[in-house]
Image (spheres, rainbow, N blue to C red):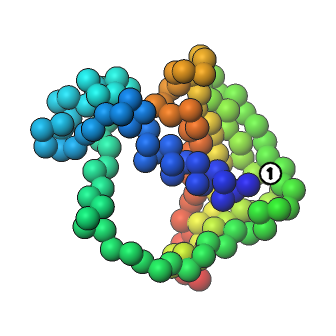
Amino acid sequence: MYYQLIFLSIISSIYGCNIHNGSWNYGRHGPDVWAEICSTCGGRRQSPINIQTTCTVYENFHPFSLTPAHNETLSFTLNNNGHTITAEPTDAKISLTGRNLDRIFSLVSFHLHWGPNHNTGSDPSSVNVYIPHRKMLFRR
């Protein structure tokens, strides 16, 4: 379940502003025209990441390790803060390690974003799950 949420979060952030088959970059299709390509990218604090895939380097990372295991039942406290639903773990410390991380990251909460119907959302994708973690002060 957690790996699915992480995967969906990554996919929604990568493809968020490409839902209209737009093409953007920091050159000719730069910040001045982002809103023409995807209206949700017209805010004052928009800054998509322009990943140049030809300059990327493959890294053979170790797998992530989730504690407790992804198939264990966990309890969360749900809160409606007026614009989203947040979920905080209540009875277990959920942590993420591995993947060449030098620290343990402890789950703080997760929250969802959605819009008034299936076509629009508060963000440019239909799947918006945010999973903030706190970096622990000690090393593994």
Q: Position of residue 1 (x, y in %)?
A: 73, 55
Q: Quadrant of the image for the C terminus? A: bottom right
For label 1, the SS is: loop
Q: Please tell me which residue is depicted at 44% across the width and 43% down the height of the picture.
A: 15
Q: Amino acid at mark 1?
A: Thr
| The quarter of the displayed image where residue 99 is located | bottom right
> Which one is in front, 28 or 5?
28
| Left or right: 89 in relation to 132 | right
> Is residue 37 visible in the rendered structure shown here?
yes
| Left or right: 56 in relation to 64 | left
| The quarter of the displayed image where residue 48 is located | top left
Q: Position of residue 121 (x, y in %)?
A: 53, 25
Q: Position of residue 18 (x, y in %)?
A: 38, 37
Q: Please tell me which residue is depicted at 34% across the width and 27% down the height of the picture.
A: 38
> Which one is in front, 82 or 64?
64
Q: Please tell me which residue is depicted at 72% across the width and 47% down the height of the picture.
A: 88
Label 1 sits on residue = 90
> Is residue 108 visible in the rendered structure shown here?
no
In the orientation shown, which residue stands out farthest toward the bottom? 140
Q: Please tell me which residue is depicted at 72% across the width and 62% down the height of the picture.
A: 94
